[in-house]
């Protein structure tokens, strides 16, 4: 690094340290600012007694009123109180962390090719992934019932290839994936919260509709699509065509509306054009009106896609209301009471609070859309996302100022109405440039105001230098008291965008494969074809001159077949491997030397992979998962004859 760069970085760091104060100048309540981590002067949590408790009873956490705050340390052998579900960004996966330990417990491959499990190479994953191997996951949300998590599914977007995928929480594996038609840049997603219903997906990029090459360089004909996917069947139900780039998504708690922040209301394709307007919009989708139009067939089709599309491109229409909000909004988050939508300004230092109970009046024309806005608090430079503690406070991530700003929603509303009242409570500097933030149970009615995660885009000097590509920094903040308290730095690999923190008692994974996921129907269909009992039988079946199917069971420390003869070079070979062990944690796998073939087979699981037999010779296959004292001996020979 040059001296200049060093000086610049040092300056930046000092700036970041004081930015809490700098960012506050001009903001009501600047004098009330308390630095993050300065404990004890402040009254202990205002919410003592209001927390819902975690109910999991796993940790020895002191009560919320303890002046020292919550204990983030989870002793070896102790379990975390929360599951954290992290999107994996351009790694295409989901990660499970324990909170508050921030231990990474598992990676769930979704849109990515993964060596260890064979995800993306096994027969079923290849089929549902349509031959694609990259994904860009930004947002993970769980299925809901009655305003809180029902522990069944995790939904996740793929911005790269415009897809939505689902993970089953019983086995923590991807079980469905759907392409979002007519759109690009599937970004914000959010499921309905009153029950497992629709999952809404926003297209961030505007494109010609249809995008068939007939329109190229005419941005006036570019549009976005707000898409509803059925959260049970994972089928695309309908789409709504609108102008603008839709960013983040949210839903109310009643099932009446879905929301999308919309930037680039100017509909530009270059940066300058996208930023010219002083205000952009919060889109509110009237789900009943949209369903009515879909049922009545008042829809259009785009290209060859069979999905009904509601045209909501007119400035005023019954389907989508445009609420003017501060310039280039990014996050939209609904508070746990379901009363307010908080929109973060991104290019404006303000947030916008929308009163959801007024939206019906605005749709009915009794008030102007803008009258739904009940507060516009000044929050700092670059507000992005907002979390809640269930005690009336909001925590907004401030990207440029690098802090989390805690503010009181009711006070912001009173200030907006003209009262002299402070709404900023305090700020916590984070390291550095925070994107998303989320708090324990924040996206539910049961927000408990205990832990907050700040997903910082840059870690700079917080960790040992590991080369030009640095980890990010997911920081853990105790929000149980009046003052936020930074307690942990968590390096993460590229590049989780968002996370949700879910009480552990709401999630109930199995330890032994229950064989209920969609892929088992495929294996069972093959087995039926061949008269095979998957859990018992092993057999080599030549299906055609170039096709061989092999059923093989495994039980520690043996494969049922230790020799696979009769294969000719160039044969298409399918291995369907079943693990007979119903012992917790006893995974086997199948890895074939020099064939680019490796997959996992978990307890009582079946997995299958198809490949082309290589040059004549002997190839050892082996179990790649350490399963037994004789694990290294768990292998066999694959004989390839000349054709
Ligand atoms: S985004 S840093 Cu893709 Cu969720 Cu806001
Ligand atoms: Cu089975 Cu190692």
Image: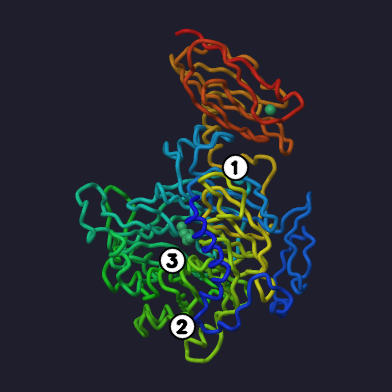
- CA distance separating discs 2 and 1: 48 Å
**Residue 330, label in figure:** 3
First in sequence, mark 3 or 1: give its number. 3
Label 2: how many Cα within 10 Å (few below 14, some 14–19, many 20+):
many
**Up-down relation of residue 421 to residue 482 (above or below):** below
Label 3: how many Cα within 10 Å (few below 14, some 14–19, many 20+):
many
* Residue at 52% over, 48% down: 494
Find numbered disc 3 in the image and state the secondary structure of the residue it sits on.
loop
Q: Which residue is tagged 1?
A: 516
First in sequence, mark 2 or 1: give its number. 2
> Toward the viewer: 335 or 438?
438
**Residue 325, label in figure:** none
- CA distance separating discs 3 and 1: 38 Å
Mark 3 or 2: in front is 3
Q: Residue furthest front?
A: 3
Count of numbered labels shown in the rendering: 3
**Residue 374, label in figure:** 2
- CA distance separating discs 3 and 2: 18 Å
**Residue 467: quadrant of the picture:** top right
> Toward the viewer: 92 or 508?
92
Find numbered disc 1 in the image and state the secondary structure of the residue it sits on.
loop
Q: Can you give x and y, in whole percent of width and height, for residue 244 in the image?
A: 32, 64
Q: Residue furthest top?
A: 642
* Residue at 53% over, 53% down: 496
> Toward the viewer: 591 or 401?
401
**Up-down relation of residue 623 to residue 153 (above or below):** above
**Residue 483: quadrant of the picture:** bottom right
């Amino acid at each position: 690094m040059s001296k200049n760069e060093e000086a610049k970085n040092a300056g930046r760091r000092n700036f970041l340290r004081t930015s809490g104060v700098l960012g506050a100048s001009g903001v009501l309540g600047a004098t009330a600012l308390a630095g993050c981590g300065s404990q004890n002067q402040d009254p202990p949590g205002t919410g003592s007694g209001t927390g819902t408790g975690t109910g999991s009873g796993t940790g020895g956490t002191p009560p919320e009123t303890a002046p020292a705050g919550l204990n983030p340390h989870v002793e070896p052998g102790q379990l975390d109180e929360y599951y954290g579900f992290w999107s994996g960004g351009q790694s295409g996966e989901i990660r499970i962390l324990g909170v508050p330990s921030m231990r990474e417990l598992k990676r769930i491959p979704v849109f990515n090719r993964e060596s260890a499990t064979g995800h993306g190479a096994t027969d079923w994953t290849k089929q549902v992934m349509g031959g694609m191997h990259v994904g860009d996951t930004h947002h993970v949300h769980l299925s809901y019932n009655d305003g809180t998590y029902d522990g069944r599914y995790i939904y996740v977007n793929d911005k790269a290839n415009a897809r939505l995928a689902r993970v089953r929480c019983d086995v923590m594996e991807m079980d469905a994936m759907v392409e979002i038609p007519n759109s690009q840049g599937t970004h914000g997603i959010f499921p309905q919260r009153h029950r497992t219903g629709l999952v809404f997906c926003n297209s961030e990029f505007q494109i010609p509709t249809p995008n068939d090459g007939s329109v190229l360089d005419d941005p006036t004909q570019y549009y976005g699509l707000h898409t509803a996917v059925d959260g049970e069947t994972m089928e695309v139900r309908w789409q709504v065509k609108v102008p603008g780039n839709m960013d983040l998504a949210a839903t109310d708690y009643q099932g009446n509306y879905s929301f999308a922040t919309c930037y680039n209301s100017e509909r530009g394709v270059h940066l300058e054009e996208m930023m010219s307007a002083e205000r952009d919009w919060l889109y509110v989708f009237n789900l009943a009106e949209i369903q009515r139009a879909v049922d009545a067939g008042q829809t259009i089709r785009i290209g060859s896609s069979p999905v009904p599309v509601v045209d909501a491109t007119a400035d005023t229409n019954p389907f989508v209301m445009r609420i003017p909000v501060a310039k280039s909004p990014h996050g939209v988050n609904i508070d746990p009471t379901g009363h307010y939508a908080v929109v973060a300004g991104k290019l404006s230092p303000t947030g916008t609070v929308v009163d959801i109970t007024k939206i019906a009046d605005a749709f009915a024309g009794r008030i102007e859309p803008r009258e739904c806005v009940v507060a516009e608090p000044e929050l700092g430079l670059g507000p992005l996302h907002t979390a809640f503690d269930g005690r009336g406070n909001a925590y907004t991530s401030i990207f440029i100022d690098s802090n989390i700003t805690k503010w009181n929603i009711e006070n912001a509303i009173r200030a907006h109405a003209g009262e002299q009242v402070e709404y900023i409570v305090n700020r916590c500097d984070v390291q550095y440039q925070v994107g998303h933030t989320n708090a324990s149970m924040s996206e539910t009615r049961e927000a408990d105001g205990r832990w907050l995660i700040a997903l910082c885009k840059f870690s700079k000097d917080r960790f040992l230098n590991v080369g030009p590509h640095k980890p990010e920094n997911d920081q853990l903040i105790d929000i149980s008291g009046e003052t936020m308290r930074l307690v942990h730095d968590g390096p993460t690999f590229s590049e989780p965008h968002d996370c949700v923190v879910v009480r552990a008692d709401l999630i109930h994974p199995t330890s032994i494969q229950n064989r209920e996921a969609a892929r088992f129907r495929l294996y069972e269909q093959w087995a039926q074809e061949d008269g095979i009992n998957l859990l018992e039988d092993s057999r080599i079946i030549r299906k055609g001159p170039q096709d061989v199917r092999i059923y093989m069971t495994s039980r520690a420390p043996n494969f049922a077949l230790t020799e696979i003869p009769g294969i000719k070079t160039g044969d298409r070979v399918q291995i369907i491997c079943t693990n007979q062990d119903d012992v917790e944690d006893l995974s086997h796998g199948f890895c074939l030397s020099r064939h680019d073939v490796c997959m996992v087979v978990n307890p009582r699981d079946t997995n299958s992979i198809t490949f082309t037999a290589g040059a004549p010779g002997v190839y050892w296959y082996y179990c790649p998962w350490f399963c037994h004292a004789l694990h290294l001996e768990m292998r066999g020979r694959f004989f390839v004859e000349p054709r």
